[in-house]
Amino acid sequence: MSAVPAKLAASDGRESARRGGRPRKKRGVSGYIFVCAYVLLLFCFGVAPTGYAIYLALSSSGGHFVGFSNFVSTGKDFRFVAAFEHIGEYLSIWLGSLVVFVLGLALMLHSMARRVSSVFRFIFYLPGALAGAASVLVWLFMLDPSVSPLHVLLSAFGLHVLGQTLLPNHLPIVFAVIAFWTGAGGWIVVTYGALNNIPYELLEAAALDGASAWQTALRVKLPLIKKWVVYMLILAFAAGTQLFVEPQLVSEASLGLVSQTWSPNELAYYLAFQNDNFNGAAAVSVDLLIVGLLVAAVLVFRTKLFEVD
Amino acid sequence: MNPLVTGRSRHTHTSRGIRTALAVFAAAGIACASVAVGAAAAAPRTTRSSASPIVVWVDSTRVPMIKAYEKANPTVKIDLVIYNGNANGSGYLQSKIALDNRVGAGWPDIVFSEENNDASSLANAQFHYPAALSKGLVSKSVLNGFAKGTIAGCTIDGTVYCLRNDLAQNVLWYNSALMKKFGYKVPTTWQQYQALGQTVAKQHPGYIIGSANDTWTEEIYLWGSACPMNYVTGPLTVDINLASSKCTRMASLLDSLVKAKSVNDTESVFSSSFDTTYAVTKASPLGHVLMMPGPSWYGADLLVASNIIPKGDIGAADPLAWAGSPAVTGEVGGGLWFMSSHSKNKAAVASMLVWLSTSAGSQGISVGYPAFVADQTSWIAGQQASGDYATQLGPVFATAATEVWPDWGPVPYSTEAVWADTVTPALVGGGTITSQLANYGTQLTDFAQSDGYTVVTKP
């Protein structure tokens, strides 16, 4: 009993003032240093390229301002709607499974004994340690029935060759499985951390009031970590709309069974590097940015994400 | 010491430090951004001086040719880069050239591409990569030494932009031992081929007479049927008519044989699962491939390399004809050698380019039948000496080279890539080629139009 409040106290930043009486301003300084490095990277690899993309999207290859004509011409491209449909299907599967399984597994871990839970956290997180491209290669083996350790399972679904696994209507599921395997572990750990921030007194009070583990999870824990879930959804949505490595590598490895413009990001890449149309590519990238920002704005305002209790 | 004062003084000192650090970071950031933007906006500049090494990009199959050049010319410095050869319409080469054009540097001096339509994209105004070889870099006598028609795909508006490495004319490969064992005669027409396929399905299930899963399936079968799906009729005008009976007859033929299971439709001939199912094994010493229409390079690169047909039993026959029509055939690849228009030491680079595509030292070790006529006899002799073949390759390859249907023009988009993601998945999913022809035609039309082509449909 005594260990839990001690941990909660340690996790509360306000407690630091009591520790050794170090001046508060010192803490502020180190914060600035950390933020400074982040801001620099954000500027170099986030803000500056975004600004450049917006400039390209609004100009011609000769550098003249052309308004929205790049957006119109790429919007009329015969691959544009299909690419957004593909990514829509993929996102609905990926985000749905992410929320359900991440919350389910994190709640399960939270109710486990600490040692067992830490082992599982490590196991869940492990696939995320592989770089994106490497994890796709792992899955290429897993999904090819001729070499897969899961070939019995694949055969049960009527899949006997790689081409059958990669049929067009299977692709959103295949990419969602790869994304879940590589990305969910990190979110399980984050969500577990969020669950640990719930004051023990609240859970104890719920238990004293006769709440079952199921009721505690649904009515006490979940509402308290709602903002973390929203945060996860915003980032997962943004990352999901930018799907590139998975379809690109799977296409290459399957000798082109997956279209080179399966996702909008691939379409942008194709326009830039196959048609030498950097301005059109920038327009598709800005489309993705706008979609991501709109969804983030809706989620932020609907859930009052930035409001401090 | 007053701790409060000390604290303030330390804080002030630290703040100044942070401001300095921030200033340094900001300056570095601005410099980073300026460099990136500046690089993008920089004017193109030439990449190689005469002292610089020659940068060469080839696929792994062509590496021995480069090594042979290095051995023959030890004073020439070469930077060798192995890439995917732009295979299967991957577009990798275009993406790299687009980036090089963007930053105005980095172009390879010499590039090998497996895609025989690449001149039409790389030489256009967007990429403007290859040097105009016929304008003083390669002599007319060398250009005239290539087999008839082989430089056509390298010629844009009368200027030659590449040299052909090998001919990839399709022939009919067969397993002489199996044919003899089963008592079959090698067919000469597609009708006989189809009838034999039905017989094989009944008499020897599990054996195949062809494969229709690869990205180049359309280049073997539709091109070999004179299907007008790629007929460049004028500058930026292409005839695409998949509804033509010349296309549908071949689609029905393949569909009937796929249904009978005497043509493979689920695995690439280069996949491990294809080897497992059809190649030569201890249990099956003759393999399960009876015939295989395919390019001249199938011999060394597939049938020998993957042990699909036993060594010594590999036969090659003339391309199949439709009864009553003159025989025509197609090509799968046939590599191209390009040199950069941005190279500074053009003479040295051009000399290497000519050596790679014409010399016996290079073409003698090529896996494909040389496009340069003077090298063909010795190349054939080398192949025959290997003992892998049961028949004489020379007459068959020579006949096939003259039968390549010329109305299949190079276009800047990849018909292979479009076939792979439209027709192949349908086939693997249990559909038919016939049902996908219209969809394939629509996709090709969309690609042609997006590349600025006018699409016409001639009956």
Image (spheres, helix red, strand yellow):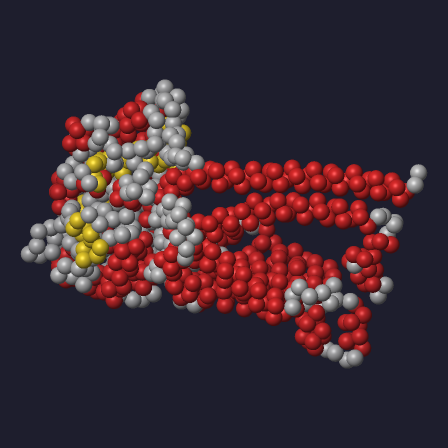
Residue B154 vs A178, above or below: the answer is above
Residue A201 vs B140, above or below: the answer is below
**Could you tell me if residue A150 is visible in this image?**
no
Residue B383 at x, y percent in the picture:
23, 35
**Could you tell me if residue A216 is visible in this image?**
yes
Q: Is residue A303 left or right of residue B77?
A: right
Tell which of A135 and A205 is nearer to you.
Answer: A205
Image point (45%, 62%), residue name: A87
Image point (74%, 39%), residue name: B16
Tell which of A3 and B143 is nearer to you.
Answer: B143
Residue B77 at x, y percent in the picture:
39, 24
Image point (49%, 48%), residue name: A52
Q: Is residue B303 left or right of residue A113?
A: left
Q: Is residue B171 left or right of residue B211?
A: left
Tell which of B310 and B92 is nearer to you.
Answer: B92
Q: Quadrant of residue B256?
A: bottom left
Q: Quadrant of residue B65?
A: top left
Q: Is residue B345 left or right of residue A134?
A: left
Image point (82%, 40%), residue name: B10
Report the number of numbered marks.
0
Query: Farthest residue in the top direction?
Result: B75
Q: Quadrant of the C terminus of chain A?
A: bottom right
Residue B63 at x, y percent in the picture:
35, 33
Q: Quadrant of the N terminus of chain A?
A: bottom right
Query: Farthest residue in the right direction?
Result: B1
Tell which of B392 and B231 is nearer to you.
Answer: B231
Residue B185 at x, y percent in the picture:
13, 53
